[in-house]
């Protein structure tokens, strides 16, 4: 996409974050998050939840909770992803 000059949108980044999480690719996860911030892609509840889940699956619960804390709105899915991230770290308190 980048070589063609096409910018990703929120939906595209949700899928990219999901793929990074399933692969456990922390470097790619950090790059994806930086890309979202640099290009000012709208980080709605769905994308925020995908980022929380991505970082949790990649073994970086601190980044997952940082994204969670910066979310304007949180639904059950976001809370579930954040709880999963804290559980991976062995921390049951928020």
Image (spheres, rainbow, N blue to C red):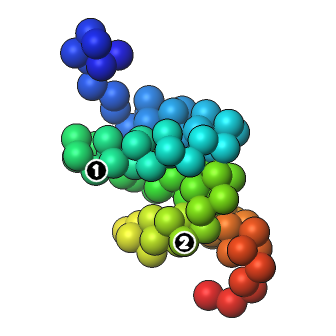
- Residue shown at 51% from the left, 52% from the top: 51
Q: Is residue 9 above or below residue 78?
A: above
Q: Quadrant of the C terminus?
A: bottom right
- The total of numbered circles placed on residues is 2
Q: Position of residue 39 (x, y in %)?
A: 22, 41
Q: Is residue 86 above or below residue 56?
A: below
- Residue shown at 44% from the left, 29% from the top: 12
Q: Position of residue 59 (x, y in %)?
A: 66, 59
The residue tagged 2 is 62
Q: Quadrant of the N terminus?
A: top left
Q: Residues within 10 Å of mark 1 (few under 14, many from 20)?
A: few
Taking the image as shown, residue 63 lies to the left or right of residue 5, namely right
Q: Which mark is residue 37?
A: 1
Taking the image as shown, residue 33 lies to the left or right of residue 24, namely left
Q: Position of residue 2 (x, y in %)?
A: 30, 19
- Asked which secondary structure carries label 1, the reply is helix
The part of the image, by quadrant, that contains residue 78 is bottom right
The residue lying toward the viewer, choosing from 21 and 78, is 21
The part of the image, by quadrant, that contains residue 86 is bottom right
- Asked which secondary structure carries label 2, the reply is helix
């Amino acid at each position: 996409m980048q070589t063609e000059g096409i910018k990703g949108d929120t939906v595209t980044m949700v899928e990219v974050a999901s793929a990074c999480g399933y692969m456990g690719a922390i470097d790619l996860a950090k790059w994806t998050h930086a890309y979202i911030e640099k290009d000012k892609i709208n980080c709605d509840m769905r994308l925020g939840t995908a980022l929380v889940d991505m970082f949790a699956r990649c073994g970086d619960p601190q980044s997952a909770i940082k994204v969670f804390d910066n979310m304007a709105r949180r639904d059950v899915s976001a809370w579930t992803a954040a709880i999963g991230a804290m559980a991976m770290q062995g921390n049951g308190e928020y």
